[in-house]
Amino acid sequence: MNFKSENLLNDILSRRDDLIDLTQKLIKIPTLNPPGNNYLKICEYLKIRMEKSGFTSKLIRAYDTPGDSDKFPRWNLVCFREGGLQGKTVHFNGHTDVVETGKGWTVDPFEGKCIDGLVYGRGACDMKGGIASSIIAVESFISLFPNYPGKIEFSFTADEETGGYGGVAYLANKGYFSPSKVNSVIIPEPLNKDRICLGHRGVWWAEIETFGRIAHGSMPFLGDSAIRHMGAVLREFEEKLYPKLQTIKTKMPVVPDGAKTSTMNINSIHGGEVEQEEDFSGYPAAVVADSCKIIIDRRFLIEESINNVKKDIKGLLDNLETSREGFKYKISDLHEVIPTMADKNSHLVSELSNSIKEIIGVQPDYVISPGTYDQKHIERIGKLKNCVAYGPGILDLAHQPDEYISVDDMLDSAKVMAISLGGLLK
């Protein structure tokens, strides 16, 4: 079968208005996570759309996953379409959830307004524009080649923004990304249309708690402040850990450059009694804090082991326990993901690379994401390594006010995905 790219490219261009309309309709469904609003609504909308193109679809609720409840059920949609000939299976995955809007918007974040070739709205870039581009790419492809070889699949999944456990992780545990069933997975995350993202850094989230002894705030010498103990922890981080992290470099092509070193963020800190917000106009409790907690977000590189990452933190805490009077602590694991990097010489990467050179006229950059995305579950649980992120949008715009995506970038990415399909399915 000869998959002529010229016909495909013209057909995709003819779908420009449909692409804009689809992106706008997805943005107008406010799938905020947390708490996980409107997952069923967006899945039902996509189900109708995909079935019109001949896909068989299945709604799947991720029961008993984090956040799943009758009020906020974690709904996912999986769609399949067989071609007429023997071939391989290509799977497109996109997350439907978006983060909170935040302040600073100059447009309605859920209107999906198109201004001067840019579609604005929460999720426009991350990643409803990517979902729309992949759908248009496939609809164009199958309209011209209805009897293509192999199978095309889609999954529209929940909760990527909070770890993906109610979405891709759940489907991976059910076998939907098994290498015996799927050959290639493309996740149209916003990594720029001339980049192929091979993977991501690792992450370890943990809670550290220091302990003290409660006493009257006017007589702190009778107590022992957990907050001061936590201050000692933070000082150890500043003086010993952060300088060490700056020396750990990677050969992974991580973007931006600052993420080529190991990093750690203090996500939050909480200590002492909660202030009374209503009855006492915000007055604090006059006591010494007997507990203080921080959440750490440690991002690490493929050259590091998760065991050594944890050992570095625990070593500093153990040293304080022996050197600082009254120091006691507890550390609890919250979340961990091992770094991943697909083979840039794989068939999947090669097809996408050739398509980018044909459509955009540049040699693509091969990059690694500073943060994780759902590729982690496809590789770790699904055991499928042939997975990359490729899609339209500028990563720096994700989660920002006035988030937008370029219509031209969506069209170019749709062209790349569509002409890549022919080679990937054969």
Image (cartoon, grey):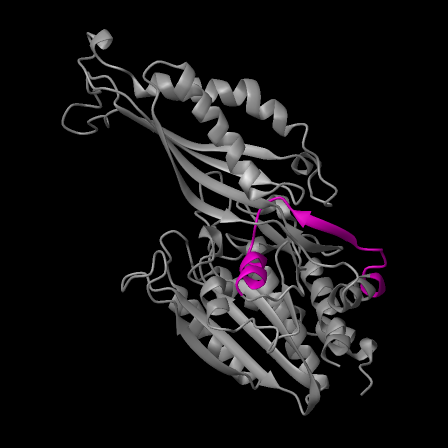
Q: Up-down: is 270 above or below 200? A: above
Look at 59% across and 34% down and name the residue there: 263
Look at 66% across and 74% down and name the residue there: 183
Image check: 142 left or right of 399? right
User: Seen from this angle, which residue lies furthest front?
Assistant: 322
Look at 55% across and 37% down and name the residue there: 309
Q: Is residue 261 visible?
A: yes
Image check: 238 left or right of 276? right
Quadrant assignment for the C terminus? bottom right
| 193 or 322, nearer to the observer | 322
Where residue 330 sits: x, y (%)? 35, 32
Look at 72% across and 75% down and name the residue there: 421
What segment carries the magenta color? 357-381
Give yes or no for residue 368 being in the magenta stretch.
Answer: yes
| 281 or 22, nearer to the observer | 281
Q: Is residue 18 visible?
A: no
Give yes or no for residue 88 being in the magenta stretch.
Answer: no
Image check: 296 left or right of 147? left
Where residue 383 sits: x, y (%)? 58, 65
Q: Up-down: is 208 above or below 404? A: above
Where residue 4 sits: x, y (%)? 82, 80
Residue 392, quarter of picture: bottom right
Residue 321, quarter of picture: top left
